[in-house]
Amino acid sequence: MSQLVVDAHSVGKVFGKGEGRVEALRDISMQIEAGEFVSLIGPSGCGKSTLLRLVGDLTTPTSGEIEINGKPPRRARLDRDYGIVFQKATLLDWRTVRKNVELPLEIMDVDDRAKIADEMLSLVQLGDFGDHYPWQLSGGMQQRVAIARALTFNPSLLLMDEPFGALDEMTRELMQQEVLRIWHETDTTVVFVTHSIPEAVFLSTRVVVMSPRPGRISDVVETNLPQPRDEDTREAQAYYDKITEVREALRRQEARA
Amino acid sequence: MTGLHTHLPKALFSPAMTTGGEQRGRWELLAPRTRKVISIVGVVLFLATAWELYKVVWGALGWIRPVRPDNVVMPHTWDMVIELFQPVRRGGAILIIDLAARTFWTLREALVGFVVGAGIGFGLGVLFVRSLLAERAFMPYVVASQTVPIIAIAPMVVVWGGRLDIPQWLAVSVIAAYLTFFPVAINTLRGLRSPDPTTLELMRSYAAKPNEVLWKVQTPAALPYIFTALKVSATASIVGALIGELPAGFQNGLGRALLTFSQQFAVQSTKLYSTVIVCALAGILFVGLVSWVERRVIPVRAVELDLETGIEPA
């Protein structure tokens, strides 16, 4: 069995106290092995983003335990074990694209920053845009820069929080293709939050289906679609079958609720 | 949009519109610097004309409200200019030379106060953004400090400065700093809080230290806010210096000249008017200097659409 990157045991998260108390997550247990591509999917309020933020130590669990690469999340964050991409590209307006990609390297005191940044920009096919400013790029290009930035320091884990949520459908499909290519070229483990069923199925090795109030894991769908995935995958019967499977898993929770 | 416009047949434009377009075209052919000079001179001429027109009309109709248009209360604009080239006193230097030296003196006081005040203001902004407790504890006093009239504070500072044996002009700088720090502190605080939470989470994911967040994210994000404050402060620091000079013992500054000439106002008002104009010019110079620095520090977000294609230049 290969190494566990994420190991969560009956994790719960509660926001607030008394009247305003909201139970965001209840009894979440989840193991993710190195090299997996796992999507978290579910309706709004199912706590999928909260779960991702717990993994990244951007918030702390109220109960239960999480380990990242065998360490507490805080230790993993301080060791820079993961890179993160948000729905917004969150690029710094006053820095060029290259300087934006260099940002984590500056903080981590890495040498040869410009060279690494240019390699990463080539990886996301923006090799010629290093001297541009973020506001000169389209939304899709900005999100590529954010991905390049998250990968500069070779994190073993890539956390993506609805990274393509703000993009149009065509750009979105292109970006999905890109992420898969990058996932193959680097050997990163990816945890990907989305509310698009086709996106989850197309990208993942495993889809974790969550249900809301409180957020729980209701189903796990192994996709088993052949790799590498490409435009043909989107037209394959197996792909549609998996989409149906995930959709039915989401429907079942509605019936239960 | 512009692209659409150029595809419209010319006949759709009325002759008047075409003429207007051509005139604007000619104006835009001028170098930006020339255009700037023409607009500045234009405004000055407009104001001078309005002033003289008021004198003529009010004089002819015998009106005295709001202001009596006689040559003491409202001297001719050309007399103000001529006054600049008259000796201040018999055998002395002409007024404009005298005022130039005074301007230099007052600007130095203001500049020193401005730099110190801006530094203190930035420091307070950083302190407050880091500690809510410090903000709650000190902010009321910071606000209170600005409601106390500077006229009341200035003599105290000058006297204390004298006890401490610091040069008097430096005591005046303290007063300038007193007026400078407040807008900078408030705007720095606002600016340091301007990055969105996601950007701060990103920095957290890199395990960035608070100082790295401050210098790499918060301060650059705050710069537009800080420069806005600095422009306000630039004029405030000159006001502070002018007022600070009133109780001070020396004769060198523009503030002293304002005081002296205001005492002669009933007899000869042109000197005061000329000095007021010079004070205003000093303020414009100072704010211009701050804007010049701003343009060099903050990269221009030049989303200038190419007029022909409507495509943003790469």
Image: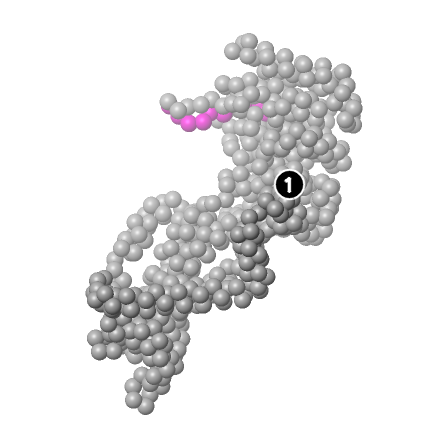
What x and y, as percent, mark residue A128? Answer: 72, 48
What x and y, as percent, mark residue A90? Answer: 57, 41
Taking depth in this image into account, of A6 and B37 the one nearest to the observer is B37
Q: Is B58 situated above or below A130?
A: below
Residue on which disc 1 sits: A138
Q: Dot 1: what SS?
A: loop
User: The magenta stretch spans which residues?
Assistant: A7-18
Main secondary structure along the magenta-highlighted residues: strand
* Residue in the image at 50% along x and 64% along y: B36
* Residue in the image at 39% along x and 60% along y: B233
> Residue A248, located in which quarter of the rendered image?
top right
What x and y, as percent, mark residue B82? Answer: 35, 80
What x and y, as percent, mark residue B282? Answer: 40, 69
Residue A11, magenta (yes or no): yes
Q: Is residue B91 visible?
A: yes
Q: Is residue B171 visible?
A: no
> Residue B44, located in which quarter of the rendered image?
bottom left
> Residue A232, located in which quarter of the rendered image?
top right
Residue B263, magenta (yes or no): no
